[in-house]
Image (cartoon, grey):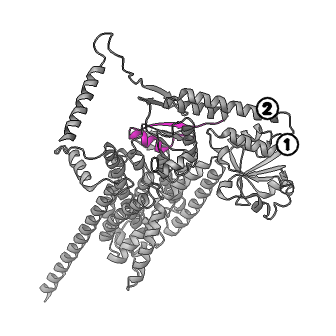
Amino acid sequence: MKKLALILLALGVTLALMIACTPTLGPTATPTPTPTPIQITDDHGRTVSIVETPQRIVSLAPSATEILFALGLGDKVVGVTDYCDYPPELLDKINATEIQRVGSYFPGFNLETIVALEPDVAFAIGATVPDYVNDLEGLGIAAVVLNAKDIDGIFHDIELVGEVTGKDAEAEALTTDLKEQIDEIVATVANASIPSIFYGSDVSDPSALWTAGNGTFIDAFITMAGGENIAGGVEGWTTFSLEVLIDYNPDIIVLGGALWGVSAEEVSGRAGWQDLDAVKSGNIFAIDDTLLVRPGPRIADGLDLLAGLIHPELFD
Amino acid sequence: MFALGNKTIKMFTRLKQNRRLLILLALGALLLLCLLIAAALGAVSISALDIIKMTLNKTGLFDFSATWQPSAETILFQLRLPRVIAGALVGAALASAGVLFQGLLRNPMADPYIIGTSAGAAFGATIAMMLPISFAFLSFGLVSIAAFLGALGAVFLVYNLARVGGKTPIVSMLLAGFAVSAMLTAVMFFMVTRGGRPELLHNAFSFLMGSVSGTDWTQIAIIAPLIIGGIVVARFLAFRLNAFSLGEEGAAYLGINVEREKLIILSLGSLLTAAAVCISGLVGFVGLVVPHAVRLVLGPDHRLLLPAAALSGAAFIVLADLFARTVLAPSEIPIGILTAIIGAPFFIYLLRRTRREYAF
């Protein structure tokens, strides 16, 4: 009985408030902060309408997750991909089931799980508009597709996420900070010698050592860190054979995939690798490449790591 | 004496017809059961009662108040049901196409993809994936459309390459199909490796493994008549398929216009396959093994084999997809993996259990 009375009371108060707040009579009525719908244009020129500041956000890419957390939106993220692993706070929230995993773009997101989370907006990445984004749109979920092609594109994406989520100021502060860090590193290596670099994103197959050519973030970072990418003349992701690598004989070899168990010692011991100058001089390193391949807020850390490997004399 | 014999034969035929009807009704009921189970289960659980209420509300005759989240309705009607129905259509199409190709080619390794549809579809889809544009026509994406055209284009090419002096010998067709498939597959993998984008590899792989996720009602509205109509037409070809089991020469002695019927069966099988491929990518195994399994259990008469394989194939894919989306939920497993993992042991069991020798 008491409960019922309470509910009725609450209802009454709400109703009264609603009537009181309806801005109908004269200039004395308090103006309610009516949400103004904003129209944003994503990286594929799609117009996305954001009616209210999103309170429930699904991230469909590790980079988008990192941007959201960096902008202080961790509490509004309700869904992330199977591959989202940063920041540590995210993992705590997943363990506490505050955030749910929704699958991965390969072999496919679980649309049922996404819809059940009732998100206001989803952030995705893709060189073209992914199918699942069209699916989400068809289900009435606003989806913003990010597609940073270069470092400036990353800054733009951070600001785009800020705009969609009402964190414009935070986004600007973040990009300003990142730009300063990056400029400082670039200035530090400006007059140094330029060693040649081989970046191996996946070297498990000796006949097809995957590396990053022109147009990839890795290539841009190698140049900014004061190195010369030996695959810089090839477009996009490509493969080198071990023969070609030996022929180039780069000064420094950087391997991705340290998080997946790739180690410089193991690769150095493989047949054919011992003859490389980089291996003989110990200039072969395995790194956590998520810093370099995710177009997110840790790119300055990634650049710092890379520059430190290429020019140890200039960094402590 | 003579009259009695005639009567016995009549009774026997009726019994046989009834048996056929009963088997098909039983398989239809099984499919319906699979559809209901698959609609009720998923990554997000919705209670059976809510599903019944939601569905009754949709008829407009009832108005139960919502005891469920609004998203549950979206999940059931816009995601799960289209997907389940798409699975049934794909399974039915591939199993029927498998029966058509096996019956026509009299080759136990024949499946819907044998004369180039899979390679053609993958080739078309990969080109579409590499193009930096995306558009949708009647809610089919560029990749689906290109896969559909690629599948049909490859068969057209193979048929014409194998044609010698007004005839298309089956052996030449199989060999030409093999060569064209090999070439298209090689070019496809070349494009994928040189595409310069890692996601291309993922997309191509996804296509090769198949998936019925993300199908919508518009796609079903277009594909369903094509597939169901195709299967009905195929059933009318059952007698000719039975004739083909005697070999081309035998079929000709029975008064079959071999070349014409060959073209009809081939076109129908390819159309069914292409229709399935454009909603699901290349789902393997079902088109090869379901016809064999049904033949092992029910015998080689195409009048029963064809509809029975269609119903079994439909139920099989619906179940495989149910596993694909629930076993590791919220992650999904490509359906092509599950069709083989579930299907192969079952098929081996059938093969070992059957005492009689395998008959085509």
SS at badge 2: helix
| Chain name for mark 2 | A
Q: Say what amino acid the circle numbered 1 marks.
A: Glu
Q: Is residue B93 magenta?
A: no
Q: For mark 2, does the 10 Å Cα neighbourhood hold few (<14), some (14 to 19), or many (20 or more) residues?
A: some
Q: Earlier in the sequence, mark 2 or mark 1?
A: 2
Point 39% across, 45% down: residue: A115
In the rendered view, tell whether residue B93 sits above or below residue A173: below
In the rendered view, tell whether residue B78 sits above or below residue B90: above
Q: Nearer the viewer, residue A239 or B239?
A: A239
Point 34% across, 54% down: residue: B45
* Residue that mark 1 sits on: A313
Q: Say what amino acid the circle numbered 2 marks.
A: Ala
Magenta residues?
A126-150
Q: Quadrant of residue A232?
A: top right
Q: Quadrant of residue A35?
A: top left
